[in-house]
Image (cartoon, grey):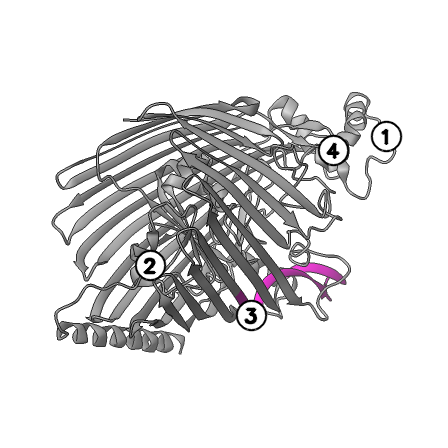
Amino acid sequence: MFKKKQALVMSVLCAIASVGFVLSASAEKPENYNLDEIVVEGRMDDANPHNTYDGKIIRTGGDVTVITSREIEKQHYDNVTDAISKVPGVEVKTPGYRGIEFGNAYTGATVAINGDNRVIFCVDGKRMGSDAITTNMNERSKGEVALLMGIANIERIEVIRGAASLAYGSDATGGVINIITKKADHSSTNIDLAAGSWGKRKGSIAHMGRKDKFGYLASWSRDQGDDTKYKDHYLNTTKTFKNTDYKEDTAFIKLDYDFDNNRALTFSYSRIDNYAGYPIFAPDYEWEGAVKDYLATGNRQPGVTNPNNRWHRWWYYYGDSVMGSYSKVKANDIDLKYTFSKIDQVDNYIRFYNNKNEHYMHRYRIKNDLSGFDRLDIASHEEDVKGTELRVGRKINSKDYLYAGMTYQHSKYDKLETETSSSTQHITRDSFSAFIQDKIKLGNKWTVTPGLRYSYVGDSKKDGKVNAESDGKVTMGAFAEYKFDDTGDVYFSWSQVYNTPYAADIENQQRFTPDKPLQSEKGDAYTIGLNKQFDKKNRININYSLVDMKNAIGRYSIWVDSENDYKSTSTNIKMKKRAFNVSGEHNFDDSWSLRGSFSYAITDKDLTNLSSSYTSYDNLYNNYKYTNKYLASLNYNKGKWNGGLDVEHYTGLDERYFSDNKFTVLNMHVNYKITKEMTAYFVMNNITNEAYETRANATYGIGTFPMEGRNFLIGVNYKF
């Protein structure tokens, strides 16, 4: 029955596409197609990206922030995470170090947009992540943001808040992070060298060139540092975050060949090698004496095993003095794209890709009974994703554009046998999606884009046996923009939400509540917003979003008869996510400018007859984040100098889990152009040495994941 339904859906989609292409064949000679939009970006004087491929063909209006390569160069971001954390409505949570434990939501960076962590990561429009398993079980994102490519290879980052197009997926309820890589259009070489606090060293070299039809880009970079420092909340002094050293190498190659004006072949390869100390938690220096005494004598002082489990925050201690707890990550991304035609300014292409991530963790930790520090944990995981993607577009007439596509993906996950564990897992899952949308311009004011999307995820097979059954659904969406004139517009969007359960969710649910099978996530996402450019000096952007989930998936405390206790298990609940963002910019003159923003996000959940006094991660989601985010940036750009002072202010934090209910972080950057080719720069972060966290843990106490204290970076960039 399901296969018949799947075949019927595909027939309908193909029929709609066929009608569009037949109509286009008999249409009048095409005119230039131009559906521009206003997009918020890092600086008003940067190149306006509203004429990009996505803006013209895929999106209608929408709430989009674009971080350009010029902005990245000025700010000297370390990685994608640093860049997007400065965007209104984007929440980035990190443990304060770079080590990663696969499958643990607490460790590693996670991203939410408008309060929703169901975020899709794309590189050049290609979705990243696996359908077999998700690296952060308590976060709904399918991708690992720490494994995205090096910042030096990026032309721009498009941050799309909320639903903006069916082309991105029916599971992108929070939004999309789309990274566009650079393309060689001239010959140049870029060398960047820098050093800073705590032994930080950075270096990169990139070279691009073009000869006739052939272009190439190659780059390599290294970023490494020693143990960082942070402001200890309890002691009000600066302390060392031991075992947080790291070294990361990234490499990128991109080759393209233009056969003619309509056909091109592009190959890219990206690799990341990351080694990082893995401290798990920051040490609780209040108990340092007790821990050292115990290591020396075996005598445990009273109060060591207190309710906050502070003893466990010294897990790293033994490992640090013997071998060290650490993680290693290797990420390989191969992409081959063939553009077989460019019709009416649209790339019609097919691509093949293979993403492979390897995670290895080696750590020493305290025994469960607190009798010593010689428990060894080793874990090794591999993710392998192979996929094929097809995109086609055709103009029906001068004001009607039909765009369609389909994607097939095979995902595989392996948990490998190690020295300390004979446990292995092998999970495979196939997925397929197809969409079609029609972008229609009505007169000179309105643009509307209705569309359909079919999403199907096949059986999840664990060690050859089905542990998650297949599911599929057709979803609809409609997007509209009304342009007042060339300086402003309002936009509206509605999209149905659909997201199948992850294999890990189903395994958790079957363990405790096999009589309550998980349903796929369903709901509706709405966005309304305003973009307005008043004059050359002033602009404002306002938007409101609502995600109404009828059966969102999360892990909550449920009474389990067989266990005679409450257990944290995967289940469906009703959930609403509301978010509001407002941002603006004012240019005082040609040299000085000020930009600012305010963001608010909250999640309402119906936990009736579901939760006990014991709370899980998902129960505390609102408590583990800020409610309000204020950003302000004062910038100067004249002659050989440019720089800025950035203020980040966060409020609405729960003092049961964070150092304070609010915190303010000041950052600055200064660039000086020594010659036409050479620029010197200076960056200082957390100028006031604020004690703060972006992630919390109810079990192990306040300050579990402290962010870096005051630090600086000084460097030079040379282009020739």
Q: CA distance from mark 2 to mark 1?
A: 63 Å
Number of other residues with Cα within 10 Å of mark 3, as a class: few under 14, some 14 to 19, many 20 or more: many
Image point 44% across, 24% down: which residue?
715
Query: Is residue 47 magenta-colored?
Result: no
From the viewer's perspective, is residue 534 above or below residue 518?
A: above
Magenta region: which residues?
A: 545-569
Precedes in sequence: disc 2 or disc 4: 2
Which quadrant of the rendered structure holds the C terminus? top left
Q: Position of residue 342 (x, y in %)?
A: 18, 57
The amino acid type found where label 3 is placed reads: Asp
Q: Residues within 10 Å of mark 1 (few under 14, many from 20)?
A: few
The residue identified by callout 2 is 55
Q: Quadrant of the N terminus?
A: bottom left
Q: Secondary structure at mark 2?
A: helix
Tell which circle, 4 or 1, labels the residue nearer the N-terminal end: 4
Residue beneath the point at 62% across and 61% down:
602
Q: Amino acid at mark 1?
A: Gln
Q: Amino acid at mark 4?
A: Asp
Q: Is residue 437 above or below residue 713?
A: below
